[in-house]
Image: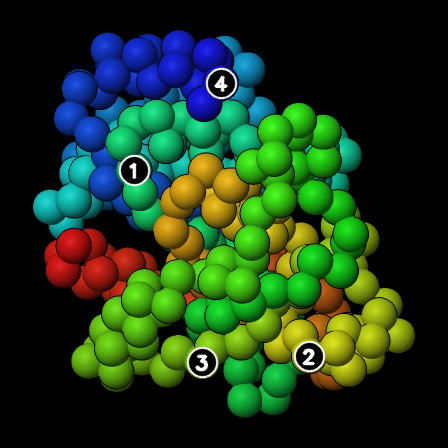
């Protein structure tokens, strides 16, 4: 754990209390309001020394520490993306902080394009595996042998099964699938979509994979979701844009919020 993370952990405890955090959440497009429902303290990213700033519209750059459905959580209202700064490890310090605050689990969310007709816009995909198509890795430059992180079980099987059971109980369709990471910020070409469909990807987006690698490096268990905002390029006639993503994200986010809340009540 870096000295900066320990220093930040002391700062956060001074502001939000000493109780350890149990679960961390990184909120993607459409889920920012969930942070507003946490009973606790909101700390703007710019008050945390060395914290990466999240400049993507539709994200709320605050770290919120408090109670959600009876569970002590740390909610990141936005993330720093690789395409903002060219740094695959941009979220390392926030996740080190999460670990230093006591968390052992991380729930990641994103907005993504679907490559499967049975996962249309407005639906959710539970990520079971990923393809790092960008080739970037947040552990490049890490000196210790801990950088050789096994990724065979990157997405925690017990957490996946729990969310699947909750979805069934709530009558929510939740399909498991493989997420492919492109660096962005431009959207993919039809040829690129055909390529990753051939490789076995079910959805595509511009985040999450670096955070999963970092989380596993830090020993955090991970579950991750895509809220499907559009069909991938070449699979429909809809115009793909960031504005379209922001407009469509709340459709799946409402279902995802129900899943997360129920999971935390069972924690």
Q: Residues within 10 Å of mark 4 (few under 14, many from 20)?
A: few
Please give the name of the residue rendered at 82% of the width and 79% of the height, measured from the top-left corner.
194
Q: Which mark is residue 80?
A: none
User: Camera-side residue: 64 or 152?
Assistant: 152
Q: Earlier in the sequence, mark 3 or mark 2?
A: 3
Q: Position of residue 71 (x, y in %)?
A: 16, 44
The residue carrying mark 1 is 103
Quadrant (top left/top right/bottom left/bottom right) for the N terminus: top left
Q: Earlier in the sequence, mark 4 or mark 3?
A: 4
Q: Position of residue 61 (x, y in %)?
A: 47, 31
The residue carrying mark 2 is 200
In space, the residues marked 4 and 3 are separated at their CA atoms by: 37 Å
Q: Secondary structure at mark 1?
A: loop
On the image, which quarter does residue 255 sit in?
Answer: bottom left
On the image, which quarter does residue 203 sit in?
Answer: bottom right
The residue carrying mark 4 is 2
Q: Secondary structure at mark 3?
A: strand
In space, the residues marked 4 and 1 are separated at their CA atoms by: 16 Å
Q: Earlier in the sequence, mark 1 or mark 2?
A: 1
Q: Earlier in the sequence, mark 1 or mark 3?
A: 1
Whether residue 45 is visible, yes or no, is no
User: Camera-side residue: 126 or 30?
Assistant: 126
User: Camera-side residue: 1 or 63?
Assistant: 1
Q: Position of residue 187 (x, y in %)?
A: 78, 59
């Amino acid at each position: 754990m870096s000295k900066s993370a320990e220093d930040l952990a002391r700062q956060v405890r001074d502001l939000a209390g000493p109780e350890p955090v149990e679960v961390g959440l990184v909120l993607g497009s459409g889920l920012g309001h969930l942070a507003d429902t946490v009973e606790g303290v909101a700390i703007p990213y710019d008050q945390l020394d060395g914290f990466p700033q999240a400049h993507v519209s539709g994200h709320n750059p605050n770290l919120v520490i408090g109670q959600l459905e009876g569970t002590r959580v740390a909610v990141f209202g936005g993330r720093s993306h690789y395409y903002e700064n060219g740094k695959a490890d941009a979220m390392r310090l926030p996740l080190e902080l999460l670990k230093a605050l006591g968390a052992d689990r991380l729930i990641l969310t994103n907005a993504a394009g679907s490559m499967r007709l049975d996962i249309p816009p407005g639906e959710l995909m539970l990520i079971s595996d990923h393809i790092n198509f960008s080739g970037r890795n947040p552990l490049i430059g890490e000196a210790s042998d801990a950088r050789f992180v096994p990724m065979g079980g990157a997405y925690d099987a017990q957490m996946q099964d729990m969310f699947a059971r909750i979805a069934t109980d709530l009558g929510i369709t939740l399909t498991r699938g493989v997420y492919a990471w492109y660096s962005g910020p431009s959207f993919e070409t039809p040829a690129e979509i055909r390529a990753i469909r051939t490789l076995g990807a079910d959805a595509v987006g511009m985040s999450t994979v670096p955070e999963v690698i970092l989380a596993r490096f830090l020993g955090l268990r991970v579950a991750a979701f895509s809220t499907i905002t559009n069909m991938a390029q070449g699979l429909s006639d809809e115009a793909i844009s960031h504005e379209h993503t922001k407009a469509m994200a709340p459709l799946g986010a409402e279902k995802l919020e129900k899943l997360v809340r129920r999971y935390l009540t069972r924690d």
